[in-house]
Amino acid sequence: MQGCSVARFSTIAQKYSRQRLTSLLASSLLTLSLSLLTQPASAQGGPAAGSEIVTVQASSAGNAVTLGGTVVAFRQVTLTAQIPGRVEFIAGQEGDSFKADDILVAIDDDDLLAKRRAAVAQFNNANSSISNAQVQYQRELWSPQDRSISQSGGMGIPNMFDQMFTQPFAQSFMPGDQGGDRYVDRTANLWGRGTQLTQARNQQLAAQSAIEEIDAKLRDARSFAPFDGVIIDKLVEEGDTVQPGQPLMVFSDLTYLQVQVDVPVRLMSGLKMGMLVPVRIDVGNVRVDARVAQIFPSADAVRHTVTVKFDLPINVPGGPGMYAEVMLPDVSAQAGEVPVIPDSAVLWRGSLPAVYVATEDERTELRLIRLGDYVSAHLVAVLSGLQVGERIYAVPPADGATSDWRQRSQ
């Protein structure tokens, strides 16, 4: 009986010890949590000592409108087939770079070469005809054939009797123009020889024109790079049969990029050539300032928008076809003073933005804010949570400072 009592007492003592230990641990954790909540944020991983503190500035900016656009190349061409045939050469793949005047696509030209050889033969024949016509004309000029006995039938008798029987009697023995006019006959013969010479020269010109036409088609069988650039899209493969007008390749100069946006007409009054506007590129959320480079002279009759192109800085990430957002001022909205801060000062926890505020009693306060639109490439407007003149840390810690988002009391 006494053994049972001792065992029961021991069990009760152990249970009481465990409860007391649990209570002590809970009390210690509560004390530690309270001490963490009452300490400044800088002691819990806030901005390190020496971090730059900036003053919240005011910006007189109207309401901004964000419009979606597309990144395009400054220069881009679509090479098309100019002659029918089979593709026998393609210089490279998408992304390959080439210099100006490099051959990009070649179409089979064996039939054109055969036609050119035939045209060259016709040209040579025309040259021979010209030479012969010139000789015949000179002979007629210096030795008229109407006076040559060799041009008549003749009867194999001396020259005097030959002319008596082969030429009209009046031309041989009667003076004047009786019986015919030798001058007219000579002029007609000269005219005929000159006509033969002219026809031979025309045949030469026709043959030369045929050669030039074939040479132009031979040049069209080769597609050359019009400038230094990159193949964006290859639309055919070697061995494909193409027809005139069929696209072969898209070639672009990616040294300079632009953003093309369809801007509503009501916003056009706030845009001027050369002005800078904030742009966000959908590649790593990059924000830059873009310059208004081109404003199209007419608006779309259906959508009532005007196409505007903005020049992006050199070496900006991205490429043609990517999405971009442009923040344009709306001059029709009433302008007002809004606080602006560097975007580097914004600390993100999920979808909630916050900043570290340097209070007057040298404490660090983590404060939730509501962001507006960008007013430049690196300055963003604050709709609520901050006042103009307050001091904030320009670069907050990368890992944040606390697990909650409650504003700390001063």
Image (cartoon, helix red, strand yellow):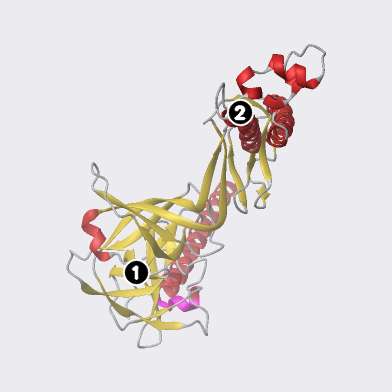
Position of residue 317 measured from the top left corner of the image (x, y, whole percent) = 54, 58
Say which residue label 2 marks: 182
Identify the residue shown where x is 60% and y is 48%: 3
| Res 288 seen here | yes
Badge 2 crowding class, 10 Å Cα cut-off, few under 14, some 14 to 19, many 20 or more, is some
Give me the disc on residue 167: none
Q: Nearer the viewer, residue 175 or 393?
A: 175
Q: Nearer the viewer, residue 263 or 182?
A: 182
Q: Nearer the viewer, residue 352 or 250?
A: 250
Is residue 40 one of those drawn in magenta? yes
- On-image quarter of the C terminus: bottom left
Identify which amino acid the numbered label 2 is placed on: Arg
Looking at the image, tell me whether mark 2 or mark 1 is earlier in sequence order: 2
Is residue 155 one of those drawn in magenta? no
Badge 1 crowding class, 10 Å Cα cut-off, few under 14, some 14 to 19, many 20 or more, is many
Position of residue 267 measured from the top left corner of the image (x, y, whole percent) = 24, 59
Identify which amino acid the numbered label 1 is placed on: Val
Q: Is residue 274 left or right of residue 228?
A: left
Identify the residue at the far top of this view. 155
- On-image quarter of the N terminus: top right
Q: Is residue 403 left or right of residue 154?
A: left
Predominant SS of the magenta segment:
helix
Identify the residue shown where x is 38% and y is 55%: 325
SS assignment at label 1: loop
Position of residue 237 measured from the top left corner of the image (x, y, whole percent) = 65, 30
Q: Is residue 350 left or right of residue 101?
A: left
Q: CA distance from mark 2 to mark 1?
A: 100 Å
Badge 2 vs badge 1, beta-carbon distance below 8 Å: no
Say which residue label 1 marks: 375
Which quarter of the figure has residue 58? bottom left
SS assignment at label 2: helix
Magenta-colored span: 38-43
